[in-house]
Structure formats: structure tokens, C-alpha cells
Image: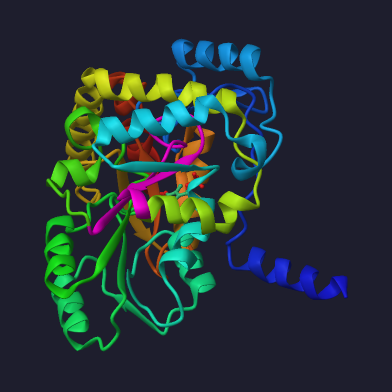
Amino acid sequence: MMNVYAARLQDWQRQGLERPHRPVQSPQGPTLSVDDRAYLAFCSNDYLGLANDPRVCAAAQKGLEQYGIGAGASALVCGYSAAQAELEAWIAHWLDLERVLLFSSGYLAHLGVIPVLVDGESAVFSDALNHASLIDGVRLARPAQLTIYPHGDWEFLEEALRRCPREQRWILTDGVFSMDGDVAPLRELERLAEQYGAWVLVDDAHGLGVLGPQGKGSLAACGVSSERVLHMATFGKAVGTAGAFVGGAAPLIDWLAQRARTHMFSTALPPLVQAATRVALECVALEEFRRTHLARLGERLDAGLQALGLKGLPSCTAIHPLILGENRRVMAVSDRLREEGLWVAAIRPPSVPEGTARLRISLSAAHSVAHIDQLLEGLEKVMGVEA
Ligand SMILES: *Cc1c(COP(=O)(O)O)cnc(C)c1O
């Protein structure tokens, strides 16, 4: 019995697909300590440098004193804390949403929400590069029709909508795509929703905090505010904490609270996390200098990559992919970088399509200009390495 899995694992390893766990001994920040060695890291999603912010940590400590550690139950039993209510109200006000519902993680949000929105009679239209959590939410929902449209191709999508006989239609998309760092054509999707009576769920895990006025995300950046667009984002990235929210029209969100199974049957987040998230979001909204600095770092990185003759995908977000193609080559380059004390995530299938393995360079407002230059020097040194 065990042999089956041992053989599969071996095969996985032979293909160069194995990913090790590397126990980090330090808080998140520009340098991470692993095996008692410090690495300059470009792989975290802590885009604004808030994951170890003293004010956010102090809020968590205060939350610990008030609430203790555990939420005790799911939200509909007795795990719904005042901290959760305050956070939901704060986000609703900030983003001008009628109602907001929190989930313990973005993954759980999608697994819970999509099967409530989408039933066996519905049609779903999903961008080819959508995050795994959207894909798995659709698997649970089992819609009558599933159309996976080419990445960002709203003309293809429009044709598919025109031909769709189903009444209930949902378009699912990342706001900012996690492995490419580009932004969905949200204005066009909003128009299609209005024109074809569809609904849109936007997963803004990588847009919140980074894009738009006050870091309100890709929807605000694109000026999208239709009632037909449901706003989802996570706190584990730029906000630096944990959890996620879904926001939109009150009856819809109230229905989700009654029916989403990951809300009903999973213990609520520790209230101290929600207390910390409130303070972190205030930093996100008020501290524009973090976004200005992040943008400056991105420009320097893109210019530096170009000077080295390396083609990064153009990006106005914190995610700067450098596509190298072959799995083994990406592994060789990232291993050599690690020897140089640089930690950059090597992303391979199934996270990205075959043949597009890449370094996913992610920047943080906690990085300095000197850190970017150090990365560029490291890349210059190791790019010649053979796979
Ligand atoms: C990280 C991520 C999620 C999942 O959010 P978690 O809170 O980490 O579970 C969902 N969507 C996208 C695009 C993500 O990058």
C-alpha cells in the first residue's frame, strides 16, 4: 500500500518538482533566518512590511489580554467576537460595501462562498490563471457549465456569455494574478456583467493594500463599483495578518453567512488576529509612503533586470516574475541564489502552466534600494548557471 505513494513521491522528485519545507526562525521581514543563516528574501507576500509591525503586534497582544487565544467555536455558535464585528464594520465603511463577512482564510472563503453562489443550474466563467482556491470552489459547486477563458481575454468571454443559455452566470477572476502580477480587465468584466446579466467575484488577494487610493485594491484602482461585482480579499498578504473577507450587497452577504459551510463548520479565527487586522488595515489606508516606496523599488528592479538582458513580465504590483521556462533551470538558478544568501521562490507547475517555470520575485515596502541592488548583483552572478 505504502509503495504506491513512495513511488509517486520518487517520480515527483525525479521530475524536479519536490518542494521542501524550510523552517523560518525569524519574523517576516527583508531578511529571514533559516538553519541559523540569514537570507535576503524576495518570496514573501508581506508587500507592505506590516507582518511584524510593532503597532500591529501590540494590537494582537491587547487582543490576547481581552479575548485569550482561541475563538472557541464557529461564528454562528459563539465564536463571533466583538473584534470580528468591529473589523467587518470597519472594512464595509472603508470600501463602501453594504456588508462584509470574514473567513479564516482566503482559501476557505472560496470553498464556502462559491458553492452558495453557484448551483447545479449555473454557468461559471473562470480565467485560465485563476488561483487554486477559486478553482476548488468551483469543483465543490459543480456548475452545469464551466468555461475557462484564456487569461484576460474578455472578448472570448463576451462571445461565451452571448452563447450561454444559462440564466445564473458567474465570472470568477483574480484581481491581481498571483504568479504573473498583472491586473484583470475589471472595467470590461464589469461591463459584461451589466450587459449579460452576469455576476463577478473578484479575488483581490494581491491587490488589497498595493493598488488603488488608500490601497483599497484593484477594484478601486479600476473604478469598478457595480452591485454585480462581489469583492473578496485576504489579509495574509499586504495586510500582514491572516483571514479574508467577502463584501457586497447586504442580502447576498447575509445569505452567505447562513449557508457558507466553511463559515458554519470551521472555528472562527482567534479574535486577537482580527484585532490586529483592524490596526494593520488602518496602516494600509493611511501610510501611502509604503506604496510609493514599493513602486519605486519595482521600477528599479525592472530597469535593473532589463539592463542585465533579463525579461521580467512588466508589473505595477509587488509581483515581478522572471520566466525561465524549464523546471530544472529554475531550480538551478534559485539554488545558486540561495548559496549567495538570496531567497527567491522558484515556481513550477502545477502552480503555473508547463514550460513557464519562473522566479517569482516579490517585493516589500520593507526592502531598501540597496536590497534590490543586492538581488540584481546576485542574479547577474548566477544566471549563467547550467541546469
Ligand atoms: C493567497 C491567495 C488566496 C488564499 O488566501 P489565504 O488567506 O492565504 O488562504 C486566494 N487567492 C489568491 C489569489 C491568493 O494569492
Q: How many marks?
A: 0
Q: In which quarter of the image is the N terminus?
A: bottom right
The residue under the point 22% across, 37% down is 211
The answer to whether residue 113 is left or right of residue 100 is right
Q: What's the residue at 47%, 65% (across, down)?
A: 116
Magenta stretch contains residue 235: yes
Q: Nearer the viewer, residue 300 or 111?
A: 111
Residue 39 visible within the image: no
Q: Nearer the viewer, residue 176 or 305?
A: 176
Res. 146 in view: yes
The spot of residue 73 in percent (x, y) is 69, 39
Q: In this view, does 54 lie to the left or right of 170?
A: right
Please identify the quarter of the rendering in which residue 147 is found.
bottom left
Q: Which of 67 and 333 is in front in this view?
A: 67
**Residue at x 17%, y 31% (from the top left corner):** 213
Residue 263 point in image, percent of width and height: 56, 50
User: Which residue is farthest front?
Assistant: 251
Q: Would residue 231 be counted in the magenta stretch? A: yes
| Residue drawn where x is 42% and y is 59% of the image | 131
Q: Residue 363 appears in which quarter of the rendering? A: top left
Q: Which of 85 and 186 is in front in this view?
A: 85
Snapshot quadrant of residue 303? top left
Across and down, in percent, residue 374 comes to: 35, 26
Residue range in magenta is 228-251
Position of residue 10 in the picture relative to residue 319 (left or right): right
The correct choice, above or below, for 33 with respect to 125 in the image is above
Colour scheme of the picture: rainbow
From the viewer's perspective, is residue 237 above or below residue 262?
above
In the displayed orientation, state which residue is furthest to the right.
1
